[in-house]
Amino acid sequence: MDTTPEYIKMNQKAMKYIPYYPTVGDWCFLKHDITSPDDMAHGLYFDEDIIIIEDRQYDNSELTPLYRQDQLQDMMNKSPGQLLWEFYSWYQDRQREATLVVRDKLFFRTSMEQLWLSFVMFELYHKTWNGEDWVKTN
C-alpha cells in the first residue's frame, strides 16, 4: 500500500472530485494525531499518521483516503477485461505523448496505486497530475 507523501498529496487534491465516505477497512491519512487511548480501543491502528479504519466512522474533514487498487478499479464500473484493456491503452497513449523529460518527471509513478489514481482521474474527471495538483487535460 502506497503511503508516500506524494500519494497522500495526490489523494488530498483528488478529494475535490472524488466523494469520500469512510468505511471499515479503508486506509487513510489522519489530519491530526491519535492521542487518546480510547482511539486505540475503538480499533484504530496507525503508523505515524496512517490509519486503517476498523470499526469507527469519521468526519470526512479528518481523513484523506489512500485508495487501494481495488477501490480505484471499482470506481470505473467496468468488467475486469475491459478495465485492463482501457488501462493498457491509456498507459500506452500517455507514454507516446510524453517527452522523455516529462515522462521521467511526471508520468512514471512510484506505485501501482499512483498509476491507477492517475488513470481514474484522467478517465472520469479529465485531470492529469502535474506534481502539485490535478489539472485539466488538454
Image (tube, rainbow, N blue to C red):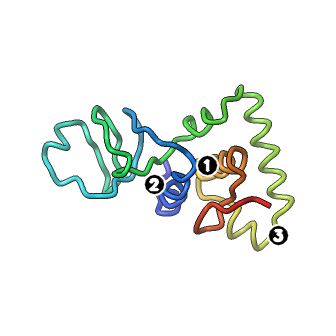
Q: Considering the numbered disc 2 on the image, is that residue within a helix, a strand or a loop?
A: loop
Q: Position of residue 3 (x, y in %)?
A: 45, 54
Residue nearest the observer in this picture, 102 or 62: 62
Q: Badge 2, how many Cα within 10 Å: few under 14, some, many 20+?
A: some
The residue wearing badge 2 is 3
Q: Earlier in the sequence, mark 1 or mark 2?
A: 2
Q: Which residue is mark 3?
A: 99
Q: Position of residue 21 (x, y in %)?
A: 43, 38
Residue at 76 percent across and 74 percent down: it is: 101
Amino acid carrying mark 3 in the image: Thr
Q: Classify 10 Å Cα crowding around label 1: few (below 14), some (14-19), many (20 and above).
A: many
Residue drawn at x 47%, y 48% is 66
What residue is disc 1 on?
117
Residue located 28% across and 43% down the image = 45
Q: Amino acid at mark 1?
A: Leu
Task: Say the numbered circle drawn on residue 38.
Answer: none
| Above or below, comparing residue 111 to residue 78 in the picture | below
Q: Nearer the viewer, mark 1 or mark 3?
A: 1
Residue found at x 82% / y 44%: 89
Instruction: Determine the secondary structure under disc 3.
Output: loop
